[in-house]
Structure formats: C-alpha cells, structure tokens
Image (cartoon, helix red, strand yellow):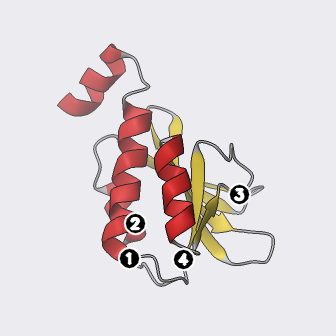
C-alpha cells in the first residue's frame, strides 16, 4: 500500500473507532457507529479505500483521476473508492478522508456530535 499513513490519519480524528470485519476482509473506520472509511480490496484484489463524498464532488474527482472510481459495493452516488497503489495525490486523499469524516459526523445527532467533540 502506497499511503502507509492512511490508518494513522484516520485514527487521529476525534471519536474514531477501528474494526476489522473478517467476512468483508476490510478494516472499517467509524464515527458515532457509522462508517466513514473502509479499507479492503476490490474483486481483482487491488487495495482500495472507500470514502463518503458529496455527489457532485465525487463525479468531478472520478472524471479527473483514473484511480478514483465509484464506491465498490457501496452507493455509487455517495461513495468513491481510491486505488491505494495509484497516483492520487496524498493531499487530495487526505482532503477526501476529511470530507468523508465531516459528512458522517454532521449526519449524527447534535448530542452525539457534542459528545465526540468534547472527548
């Protein structure tokens, strides 16, 4: 995997929990019980990270980067998958992780958001 910092970066965010799901052969990163990042492999055994994304932004990124594709086994409108052996700029991948985290965090109840931010 090219982006060796990915796990550490996800875990630096407040309230993140990591879980390996054996039947999916994937590592999940959750906030408030909801997934914001999923690291695993596609059907060709290539390593990917799937991240939630605003639909218009997702379409734009897929049109600009060949290593960003519609979410693998996820809602293709709201998720993108990034090949981890590709050439997506590291800063862009960090921005995508930030966006995914923020989208999921902001979908939680105000009470949960407050608890996560105060932890």
Q: Are marks 3 and 4 in contact (CB under 8 Å)?
A: no
Front residue (pair 32, 96): 96
- Of pointers 2 and 4, the one earlier in the residue sequence: 4
Q: Are marks 2 and 3 in contact (CB under 8 Å)?
A: no
Q: Are marks 2 and 1 in contact (CB under 8 Å)?
A: yes
Viewer can see residue 67? yes
The picture quadrant where one finds residue 104 is top left
Residue topped by disc 2:
93
Comparing labels 1 and 3, the label whose residue is closer to the camera: 1
Q: Is residue 52 left or right of residue 102?
A: right
Q: Secondary structure at mark 2?
A: helix
Front residue (pair 17, 55): 55
**Residue 58 at x, y percent in the picture:** 52, 52
The picture quadrant where one finds residue 91 is bottom left
Comparing labels 1 and 4, the label whose residue is closer to the camera: 1
Residue 12, above or below 49? above
User: Which labelled disc corresponds to residue 84?
Assistant: 4
Graded by Cα atoms within 10 Å as few (under 14), some (14 to 19) or many (20 or more), the crowding at tag 4 reads many
**Residue 6 at x, y percent in the picture:** 40, 69
User: Marks 2 and 1, Cα distance to the nearest angstrom?
Assistant: 6 Å
User: Which labelled disc corresponds to residue 89?
Assistant: 1
Identity of the residue drawn at 41% across and 37% down: 103
User: Which labelled disc corresponds to residue 72?
Assistant: 3
- Of pointers 1 and 4, the one earlier in the residue sequence: 4
- Of pointers 2 and 3, the one earlier in the residue sequence: 3
């Amino acid at each position: 995997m090219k982006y060796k910092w990915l796990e550490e970066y996800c875990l630096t965010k407040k309230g993140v929990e990591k879980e390996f799901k054996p039947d999916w052969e994937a590592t999940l990163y959750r906030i408030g019980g909801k997934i914001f990042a999923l690291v695993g492999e596609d059907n060709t055994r290539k390593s990917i990270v799937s991240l939630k994304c605003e639909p218009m932004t997702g379409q734009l990124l897929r049109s600009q980067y060949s290593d960003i594709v519609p979410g693998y086994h996820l809602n293709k409108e709201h998720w993108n998958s990034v090949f981890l052996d590709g050439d997506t700029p590291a800063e862009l991948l960090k921005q995508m992780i930030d966006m995914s985290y923020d989208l999921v965090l902001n979908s939680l109840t105000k009470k949960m958001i407050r608890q996560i931010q105060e932890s």
